[in-house]
């Protein structure tokens, strides 16, 4: 399958950004102070997380990407700005003095995560309003909008933004959070994972029951489609004209963190490029199979994707 030139695709990514920090070390003893391993850190890494990882994944495929988000007036916020610039992303990161930039710190030894520490605060209303007005200004210059909701407060006005984007004729994709999806009504597609879907519709005993629940939710929210990512079961697209199933293609699952970012980024690029639902889901599924074979939040390059598709 040949994807063609994706450089004309223009995406606007909006949502919660975070800095993913990794401390890699060696464990050779247990602490005398408490029954916990002592990690001697030998190296560290910083990677963009959340909506910033969505932006990075879309840019890695060749799309032109703008990012709109909030950060704190701090060193992690500066790191995110630098990483976005290095990734060729037009990032408008509004500084909110009332918050600290969300940081997820993971301590890793022998490819195993030992501990994760989160630093986060809720953004102020003034910063959110400023972001909303810039969103309106940036809308005309994009083909599709992706909302990446990590429940950190950066998408308080997501309902308004979806209405504005749809009124402007844009494709709208949402990676949702929480147990109430009413704010996402009117989007083109939402992409919950299996556990997020259960939070909203309850458990299902088989694929037929999942189909009924997904179709009911899709109609209730006036969505064109709903994509449920199902880990080792692959992913299923529920659409007015039927369902599309894609089997999982991962050869070895190393780390699923950030896989949803890769899925929605790839899906957005393909839909904005003019692919139909079946094509877009297939390419997103192949991309997910590549990224779960990497440690931590990571991207799939265009070369990796082409090789896997062919």
Image (spheres, rainbow, N blue to C red):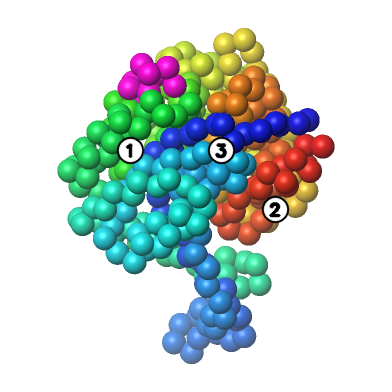
Q: Earlier in the sequence, mark 2 or mark 1?
A: 1
Which circle marks residue 155 in the picture? Answer: 1
**263 to 240, vertically: above or below:** below
> Which image quarter: residue 214?
top right
Q: Secondary structure at mark 1?
A: loop
Q: Earlier in the sequence, mark 3 or mark 1?
A: 3
Dot 1 crowding, Cα within 10 Å, few <14, some 14–19, many 20+: many
Residue 146 image position (x, y, % from top left): 46, 33
> Which image quarter: residue 40?
bottom right
| Distance (Cα) linking label 2 and label 1 | 30 Å
Which circle marks residue 63 in the picture? Answer: 3
Which circle marks residue 293 in the picture? Answer: 2
The magenta-colored residue range is 162-170
Q: Nearer the viewer, mark 3 or mark 1?
A: 3
**Relative to residue 38, is residue 252 drawn left or right?**
right
Residue 29 image position (x, y, % from top left): 59, 86
């Amino acid at each position: 399958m040949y994807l063609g030139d994706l450089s004309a695709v223009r995406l606007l990514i909006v949502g919660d950004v975070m800095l993913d920090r990794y401390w890699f070390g060696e464990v050779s003893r247990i602490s005398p102070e408490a029954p916990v391993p002592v990690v001697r850190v030998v190296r560290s890494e910083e990677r963009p997380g959340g909506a910033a990882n969505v932006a990075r994944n879309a840019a890695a495929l060749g799309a032109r990407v703008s990012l709109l988000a909030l950060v704190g007036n701090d060193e992690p916020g500066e790191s995110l700005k630098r990483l976005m610039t290095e990734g060729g992303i037009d990032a408008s990161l509004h500084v909110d003095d009332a918050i600290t930039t969300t940081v997820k710190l993971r301590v890793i030894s022998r490819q195993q995560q030992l501990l994760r520490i989160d630093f986060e605060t809720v953004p102020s209303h003034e910063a959110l309003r400023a972001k909303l007005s810039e969103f309106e200004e940036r809308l005309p210059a994009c083909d599709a909008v992706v909302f990446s909701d990590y429940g950190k407060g950066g998408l308080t006005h997501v309902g308004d933004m979806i209405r504005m984007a749809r009124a402007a004729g844009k494709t709208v994709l949402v990676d949702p959070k929480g147990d109430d999806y009413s704010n996402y009504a009117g989007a083109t597609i939402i992409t919950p994972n299996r556990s997020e879907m259960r939070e909203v519709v309850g458990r299902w005993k088989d694929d037929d029951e999942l189909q009924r629940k997904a179709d009911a939710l899709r109609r209730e929210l006036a969505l064109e489609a709903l994509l449920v990512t199902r880990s080792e079961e692959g992913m299923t697209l529920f659409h007015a004209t039927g369902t599309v199933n894609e089997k999982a293609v991962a050869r070895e699952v190393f780390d699923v963190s950030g896989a949803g970012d890769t899925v929605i980024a790839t899906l957005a690029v393909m839909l904005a490029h003019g692919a139909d639902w079946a094509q877009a889901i297939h390419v997103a599924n192949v991309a997910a199979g590549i990224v779960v074979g990497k440690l931590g939040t990571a991207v799939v390059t265009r070369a990796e994707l082409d090789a896997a598709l062919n």
